[in-house]
Amino acid sequence: MTGGSLSYGDAPATVHAKPSDFPRDPRFRVPGAAFVEDGVAHVRSYRDVRAMMLDGADELEFSRDSSFWAPAGTRIHATWSFIWGTGNRRADGLPGRYPAWREILEPYFRNRATDLLAPAVQTHTRDLVRQIVDKGAGEVNMATELAYPLALRTNCSLLGIPAEHWGWLSDQLGEVIRAPRGGLGEREPEDVEAYLWDLITARAAHPGDGLLDVLIGARDARTLTDLELLGSVWSLTQSAVEDAGTNTTNTFALLGEYGLLDQARQRVDDDTWLHWAGEEVLRFGSPFPARPAVAVTDLTLEGGVRIAAGSPARLWISAANRDPEVNGGNDQASDPSIFDVARAPNRHLSFGVGPRMCLAARLARMQAHIALRDVVRALPRLELDPSQPFERHAGITDGVLQAHFRFDQREALRCRPEA
């Protein structure tokens, strides 16, 4: 496995003054022509990134299938056996695994996941808020005390992971996402793998009607392999810590930085305002700033940049989301370098577009909306604390390690949600 195959412009964790500062190479947040560096094609314009995402249907030019870069005969991280590490075709020309994955997961996420989990998300949010208030300090690290634990609990509810194991699992995954490239360059930790197999075995012996049961049933029907089953459980758990957790943290952090938490409190029941504010957080914050791909043929991008077949590519969503084309031709819209919750339309690419659009997009949006509503109601005069550090790390995600807020503790005790 080459370094270029997984590189995302990685950087060590760094402390910044503001949530709008990002620790990655600034070139990856500026739209423009693609460039090739160290054998990796970095694609940054809205048109190029969108075209490559739409190519996911036929994969005439690019593929996300790990068989194009993974060493033959080597057991790589199980998460690459999940849907996002597969394509419609493999490097050897055989049909890829993506269609089978989509057929299994799409009905569940489209028809059941969000509606079934909404009450659980609200319960988890209120439990975490009570813990924050009961500390008695009038302060909170929104990343570690609310956003990431909420996302993990939500996905544990989705998979049926017992509550008594959430703390241990959170510690394990926290170590993984702080590792370079999110720990995805190596095989997953043995103790976590063993735990997930125990979980799968126990659930197979006492089945229910949740997503894990759907996945186990697909394995038993030989639609999925054992490794694909393991990869699905690992990925659905880790993605909670990374994607949804980062987006929820960004919701509070960016609204706080730009002085919009009071407005959020006033308009918390305005679904239209919540929608557009949430879309702007997704655009500006882009939890997963880049998507990996491999060129399957020689091609030339807009601007004349040539990419050779077999070259790894990074589709920089974080740059494409700052391209004027996100405004959809609205000449009155603000420049995409500006955070503007009134931006409409907002054609960001954070969840992808076309045939590979993220299946869990609706669920991620719901988590952030519920968290914002419940927290601003329960923590009066909530505001970002500028005296404390704000810390991001750049790996697979632009994750957050520190996001300190303060609130009126006395009033919070009066608003404390009931158990």
Image (cartoon, helix red, strand yellow):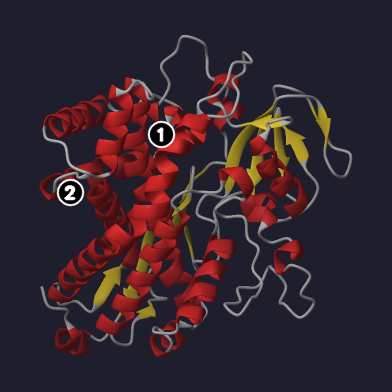
- Amino acid type at circle 1 is Gly
Residue closest to the eye, 383 or 113: 113
Q: Residue furthest top?
A: 73
Label 1 vs label 2: CA separation? 20 Å
The answer to which image quadrant residue 378 occupies is bottom left
Q: Quadrant of the N terminus?
A: top right
Residue at numbered disc 1:
183
Residue at numbered disc 2:
167
- Amino acid type at circle 2 is Gly
Q: Quadrant of the C terminus?
A: bottom left
| N-term-proximal mark, 1 vs 2 | 2
Tag shown at residue 212: none
Residue visible at 76% across and 46% down in the picture? 48
Q: Residue furthest right?
A: 304
Q: Residues within 10 Å of mark 1 (few under 14, many from 20)?
A: some
On the image, the x and y values in percent for residue 18 come to 50, 68
Residue closest to the eye, 398 or 321: 321
Give the SS element for disc 1: helix
> Is residue 195 something that shows in the picture?
yes
